[in-house]
Image: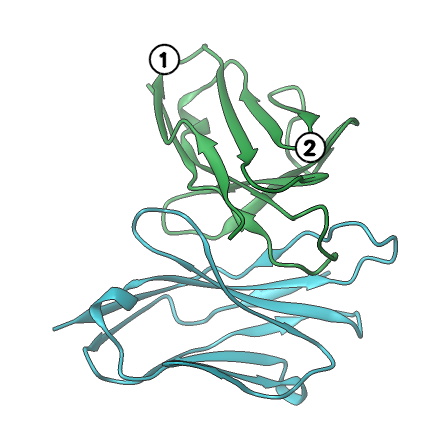
Amino acid sequence: GAVVSQHPSRVICKSGTSVKIECRSLDFQATTMFWYRQFPKQSLMLMATSNEGSKATYEQGVEKDKFLINHASLTLSTLTVTSAHPEDSSFYICSARDRGGTVVSPLHFGNGTRLTVT
Amino acid sequence: AQKVTQAQTEISVVEKEDVTLDCVYETRDTTYYLFWYKQPPSGELVFLIRRNSFDEQNEISGRYSWNFQKSTSSFNFTITASQVVDSAVYFCALSEASRSGTASKLTFGTGTRLQVTL
């Protein structure tokens, strides 16, 4: 089945530093990837839609200068949390839909990245 | 705007009991898609089922079954003869059909944490 690899799975960083999270589709191409954020015991909130070769589309209230998204190829999207602060600590999870699928093909999710900012 | 409500925050059952997870949704679109995902303690999201708004047939897959009722805007999920391995957070999600044909984002409910004990 379709596999989405997300790296790292866990990261601890100091306040003020930047952290990059990678999301790779291993056996399919993804024109579009989605980045979600999940607070403990809460739902997944869509942060942004990452489009290969173009700018990401951010949801209302998400700072695009803080959460930099780059979708440089059909198999890789990255999320960089810039100047991280403790309130950015969360579980970040990416998802992708097979380029060959339809708009309602199931999204395939990565295993998530737990970010802790100290 | 779309909304997904999972009123049950946590459910605890004893193994072999049947359990139903409720999902109620709101959307203005006549064409939409409903999903259930499972999130085990490891964090990844596992796709369980997709149902489109035109297909109200109930579905059974092994111990899992889904009841889609458009009249009540509900898409409930039943696990028969629950097992410890079913312990996870279950998310119901909604996607509206994109007119442009591009990938549509998912709106998630807040999830129901299911604990199955021996």
Work out whether residue A116 or residue A3 is closer to the camera in this orientation and state it.
Answer: A3
Q: Residue furthest right?
A: B100
Residue A7 quadrant:
top left
Q: Is residue B39 visible?
A: yes
Co-location on one chain, circles 2 and 1: yes
- Residue B92 is situated, as x and y percent measured from the top left of the image, at 52, 66
User: Helix or strand or loop: what does disc 2 sit on?
Assistant: loop
- Residue A83 is situated, as x and y percent measured from the top left of the image, at 51, 13
Q: Which residue lies furthest to the left in this view?
A: B118
Ranked by sequence position, the earlier of labels 2 and 1 is: 1
Q: What residue type is labelled 1?
A: Lys
Quadrant of the frame with the C terminus of chain A? top left
Disc 1 chain ID: A
Q: What residue sits 63% from the left and 55% below the top?
A: B106
Q: What residue sits 43% from the left and 51% below the top?
A: A42
Give the colour chain B carries in the figure. Answer: cyan
Kindly identify which residue carries mark 2: A74
Identify the disc placed on residue A117: none
Q: What residue type is labelled 2?
A: Leu
- Residue B73 is situated, as x and y percent measured from the top left of the image, at 63, 80
Q: Residue furthest top?
A: A16
User: Helix or strand or loop: what does disc 1 sit on?
Assistant: loop
Q: Can residue A59 be seen in this view?
A: no
Q: How many labels were placed on the picture?
A: 2
Q: What residue sits 79% from the left and 70% below the top?
A: B29
Q: Please name which of the two marks, 2 or 1, marks the residue nearer to the observer.
A: 2
Give the colour chain A carries in the figure. Answer: green
Give the CA separation, mark 2 to mark 1: 32 Å
Using the image, determine if residue A8 lies above or below residue B12: above
- Residue A111 is situated, as x and y percent measured from the top left of the image, at 42, 42
Kindly identify which residue carries mark 1: A14
